[in-house]
Amino acid sequence: MSEPTTEQPTQTYEQAREELAEVVRRLEAGGLTLEESLGLWERGEQLAQLCQHWLDRARERLAAAAPGEQEG
């Protein structure tokens, strides 16, 4: 898997999540060539990483906003 980027993502969390859902729908539907399936799988991995990036940033912001309420 590739390293996370430090650049600002160009897609919002919602956009990446919706595209990821579409990738999954297409893969589950089948009827694709091996190359098409691999390309979609790779795109899905990128989108999942992007969604995780957004979730991690949101978690960091919440922790910074309420430092006394962190789990521990």
Image (cartoon, grey):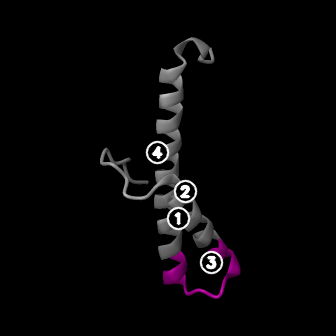
Q: What crowding class fits label 4: few (fewer than 14 Cα within 10 Å), some (14-19), or many (20 or more)?
A: some
The number of discs equals: 4
Q: Where in the figure is residue 35, as x and y percent of width and height?
A: 49, 82
Q: CA distance from mark 1 to mark 4?
A: 14 Å
Q: Which residue is mark 3?
A: 26
Structural distance between the alpha carbons of marks 2 and 3: 18 Å
Query: Given this view, does label 4 or label 2 mark the residue nearer the observer?
Result: 2
Q: Which residue is mark 2?
A: 14
Q: Which residue is mark 4?
A: 53
> Magenta region: which residues?
25-38
Q: CA distance from mark 1 to mark 3?
A: 11 Å
Of all residues, the one furthest to the front in this rendering is 65
Please state the horizontal and vertical placement of residue 30, each as a whole percent of the image: 67, 83
Crowding near the residue tagged with mark 2, few <14, some 14–19, many ≥20 C-alpha atoms within 10 Å: few
What residue is disc 1 on? 44
- For the stretch drawn in magenta, the main secondary structure is helix
